[in-house]
Image (tube, helix red, strand yellow):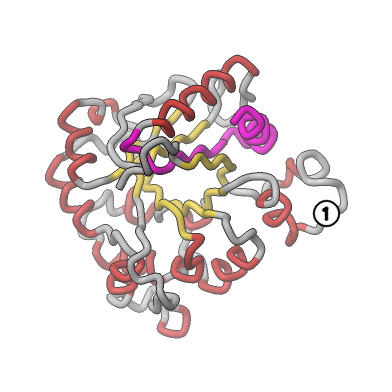
Amino acid sequence: MSHPPGRPGEIRVGISGWSYAGWRGDFYPRGLPQRQELAYAAERMGSVEINGSFYSLQRPTSYASWREQTPDDFVFAVKGGRYVTHMKRLRDVETPLANFFASGLLALGPKLGPVLWQLPERLGYDADLLASFFRLLPRTLGELAALAERHDAKVPEDRALIGVPDGLETQRVRHALEFRSPSFCTDEAFALLREHDVACVVADTAGRWPMAEAVTSDLVYVRLHGDQELYTSGYGDAVLDAWAEKCRGWAERPDVAQVVVYFDNDAKGYAPHDALRLIDRL
């Protein structure tokens, strides 16, 4: 799906996670209650990435609460569970995926944006493995709910959310893949991502892992982990100017409907400030 002719795709800029002690009294005003931090961030940016979902299954009540704390036009990206990507390494993951999707994502309703799958560095490109994983991924909220119904006891019945909010059965669910093995940087790998409509994550990792800028879906998903020092360094004006230019270029492509950018250089608190500086440029 592309955007209407003459109108650029949507660009949303935000942060990866929002609950960091070091941001209190800096990005978050001194005295702001912790429960108000998400609302404070969401008033200032168009999206945030939920990353607690990578470490453990969250609860429907948490997703519902996050939805309630944010403006109507806000979008959440959700990071897929490391049990699927790092422990199972994408093998035999139908039930783990069902558990992940039953854990409450449906409570985000219209605010559910892309789902991010981050692979470990040592998981190299394997066409068959990736294709079988991509085929399991739900592409609408209706498909997500159908997969969620197949959850096991890891998500108890009283904590499983498998109903689609009214009228949202056909809402799209987009997926993005962040790989860290250079073996993915091939035309064959990008063609496979295109075939399955999965976005190739553009990851700036201070040179630690590959940065591929292939457009493989109508979603362009950017993660900025720091350009000088991983997770630590802030972005200078000239570098942010360049990223703003890239974002505009992607958004103007007829085959791109949405560009999302998340700052993950959170160790010294640069992420939210850098996000606002990029938003200013856009």
For this view, does 159 lie left or right of residue 123? Answer: right
Between 140 and 160, the residue placed more toward the observer is 140
Query: What is the x, y in percent for residue 126?
Result: 16, 39
Query: What is the x, y in percent for residue 85?
Result: 33, 49
Report the number of discs. 1
| Magenta region includes residue 273 | yes
Between 120 and 66, the residue placed more toward the observer is 66
Outermost left residue: 128
Q: Residues within 10 Å of mark 1 (few under 14, many from 20)?
A: few
Outermost top residue: 238
Dot 1 falls on a residue whose secondary structure is loop
Outermost right residue: 31
| Magenta region includes residue 145 | no
| Residue 91 appearing in the image | yes
Outermost front residue: 6
Query: What is the x, y in percent for residue 40?
Result: 73, 52
Q: Quadrant of residue 165?
A: bottom left
Q: Residue at x 73, y 61 (%)?
A: 35
Q: Residue at x 48, y 42 (%)?
A: 10
The vertical placement of 280 against 88, above or below, is above
Query: What is the x, y in percent for residue 92?
Result: 21, 59
| Residue 54 appearing in the image | no
The stretch of residues the image draws in magenta is: 254-282
Q: Residue at x 43, y 42 (%)?
A: 258
Q: Quadrant of residue 222?
A: top left
Residue type at mark 1: give it. Leu
Residue indicated by mark 1: 32
The C terminus, quarter of image = top right
Q: Residue at x 64, y 59 (%)?
A: 71
